[in-house]
Amino acid sequence: QVQLVESGGGSVQPGGSLRLSCAASTTDFRIYSMAWFRQAPGKERELVARISAISTTNYRDSVKGRFTISRDNAKSMGYLQMNSLTPEDTAVYFCNAYGGKPLREYWGQGTQVTVSS
């Protein structure tokens, strides 16, 4: 069982930045693909960005060039740097890890990001 704990959410004005962190309770973090999802009120959860076990990254189109996903396997940490935030980025952001043998998927409890003037 892997526990994921997000931090770094908060309120920011449009154009601002936030850095989300995800701490994983495993020393085998390197074998997991890690992702950030978000869910806005009344909307479905959506993939924001993913980083594979070999650090291949992909992003949803609306955040390309603004968000950067990264990982530090030695610290069992994942990150999401968010720049040029807009009100449309307002959501609860969830950390996700997928992998291992047998394959498992884990979720954090989420951290609120609010972008408002």
Image (tube, rainbow, N blue to C red):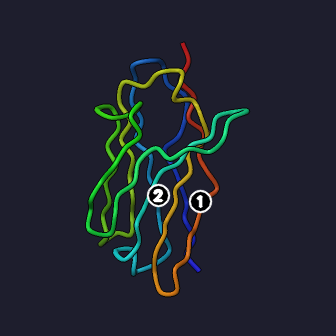
Q: 10 Å neighbourhood of mark 1: few (<14), some, or many (≥20)?
A: some
Q: Residues within 10 Å of mark 2 (few under 14, many from 20)?
A: many
Question: Dot 2: what SS?
Answer: strand
Which residue is drawn at the image coordinates 30% and 53% (left, top)? 57
Mark identifier at residue 47: none
- The quadrant in which residue 106 appears is bottom right
**Horizontal and vertical percent for residue 55?**
27, 62
Residue 59 appears left or right of 114? left
Number of marks in the image? 2
Q: Earlier in the sequence, mark 2 or mark 1?
A: 2
Q: Which residue is mark 1?
A: 108
Q: Residue at x 68, y 35 (%)?
A: 43
Tell me how far mark 2 sits from mark 1, CA to CA.
8 Å
- Which SS class for mark 1? loop
Q: Quadrant of the C terminus?
A: top right
Return the residue at label 2.
22
The front one of 39 and 22 is 39
In percent of width and height, residue 82 lies at: 38, 36
Residue 37 left/right relative to 54: right
Residue 9 higher or lower than 17, as above or below: below
Between 112 and 30, which is closer to the camera in this rendering? 30
Three-letter residue code for mark 2: Cys
Question: Which residue is most to the right?
Answer: 42
Q: Nearer the viewer, residue 102 or 31?
A: 102
Q: Are marks 2 and 1 in contact (CB under 8 Å)?
A: yes
Left-right relation of 104 to 50: right
